[in-house]
Amino acid sequence: MSEWLESAITRAQNLDDWLAPKRAHALELLAQTKWPTRKTEAWRYTPLRPVERTQASVVTADVNLSPEAIVDLAPIELVFVNGRFDASQSTKELPAGLQVSLGQDLNAEQQASALAAFSAIKPERHLFGLVNDALAEDVMLIAVAEGVEIAQPIRISSLLSQGAESHTRVQVSLAKGAHLTVIEDIQAQGETLSTAFVEYDIAADAYLEHYRFALQTGSNVAIGGSHFNLSDKSKMHSSIVGFGSDLSRLDTDIIHGGEFADAKLNAIYLLDGKELFDLHATVEHAMPNGTTEENVRCIVADRARAVFNGRIHIHRDAQKTLAALNNRNLLMSDKAEINTKPELEIYADDVRCAHGATVAEIDKQALYYLQTRGVSRPKAQVMLNFGFINELIDLMPNAALAEWVRPIIRERFAQMEVK
């Protein structure tokens, strides 16, 4: 066990609140868990040295941080600063049918119900998910009533200042026939460490539109997860955009817990310098007639390293499943590295499934051609690269978010030099 994990366990043992039973269970599992090494399959290409050497710590002083505005978007704001909920920056008047609360503010009966749902979707195999179970304090619960469609998106912003450590946790519940859009947005300054996990319980006939923007770079250590449980005829559409940092790791789990559930997952990540981004995506088809469409695209420059592990598991009873996984990667440097591992594990005999992965290099002749025609090198790189991922941006259901993220990605491309 690492010194960092020992310190985290010690801190968690000193916490005593309504989450005590779940925290005790997480600590018990952590005590039995070996610190990952290169021999640990789930962490083979993602060394944890940045975690072990981090100087980030819990910041209790007030810090003046605010989420970046998004043009043409007026979301319901829920803001965390250095792991603590900031009510002063969060929306107070909520639409009918939407309930937002902190676990510590609930009565005993409500806490018992919330406790039963806490960590029921996120698998126990996630080491840092257990760390989050043990250290999260301001746990937020979001619930949408039956048949209610919330027109405004909810933006959950996790803001970190220089040297800060945070562990945010959100539980989202959509009742039957409900509709909701959730944006997970992480913004960090300087050297930070964060774990940010969100669980989504999507009831029958409900629809979730989900976004996760992990755009922190530099010396940040960002480890988190988005975990979904789908019921009968429920639907979800998830879009992930990430940049690399000293260590960026995201785990997503989609569980088809009902029949005729439909899941779409599109992910883009762009890496430069010596950055690392690791995306592990697992889809569990446990019931019949489910569909999954998963598209992951990555561009890696300089000496950066990308990791993708995509697993689709078709259980024995999940007949009539349709599932497709496609991973496309682009190298901009001879020293960049991509490790991709798409997996299909099928136990049903009446299914249609496909998976594939490609790794290619940028066409340097095309780059040279554009430069000879008067196009600057940065603009030429944007022209050649943007089309590679623009298709997934076009698939974002929210046009305002798509238009907001386009110039951010263009600027990122302009900084990523072909070598």
Image (cartoon, rainbow, N blue to C red):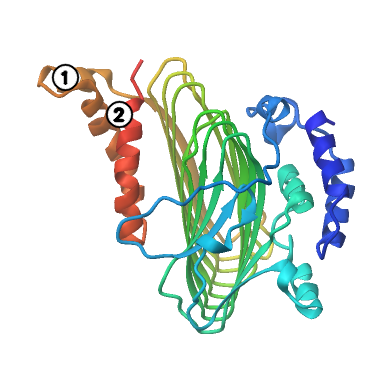
- Image side of residue 136 versus residue 142, left or right: right
- Image side of residue 345 versus residue 290, left or right: right
Residue 414's label in the rendered image is 2
- Image side of residue 336 versus residue 257, left or right: left
Of circles 2 and 1, the one toward us is 2
Give the percent coordinates (x, y) of residue 410: 30, 37
Q: Which of 326 and 251 is in front in this view?
A: 251
Query: Across the whole image, how many numbered discs are drawn on residues?
Result: 2
Residue 371's label in the rendered image is 1
Mark 2 lies on a secondary structure that is helix
Q: Dot 2, how many residues are within 10 Å of its Cα: few (below 14), some (14-19), or many (20+)?
A: some
Mark 1 lies on a secondary structure that is helix
Q: Do the residues labelled 2 and 1 touch (CB within 8 Å)?
A: no
> Identity of the amino acid at label 1?
Gln
Q: Dot 1, how many residues are within 10 Å of its Cα: few (below 14), some (14-19), or many (20+)?
A: some
The residue located at (10%, 21%) in the rendering is 374
The residue located at (47%, 51%) in the rendering is 66
In the rendered image, the quadrant that contains the C terminus is top left
Q: Nearer the viewer, residue 285 or 410?
A: 410
Q: How far apart are marks 2 and 1 (CA)?
A: 14 Å
> Identity of the amino acid at label 2?
Ala
Indicate which disc, 2 or 1, sits on the residue closer to the N terminus.
1
Give the percent coordinates (x, y) of residue 353: 52, 53
Whether 159 is drawn above or below 19: the answer is above
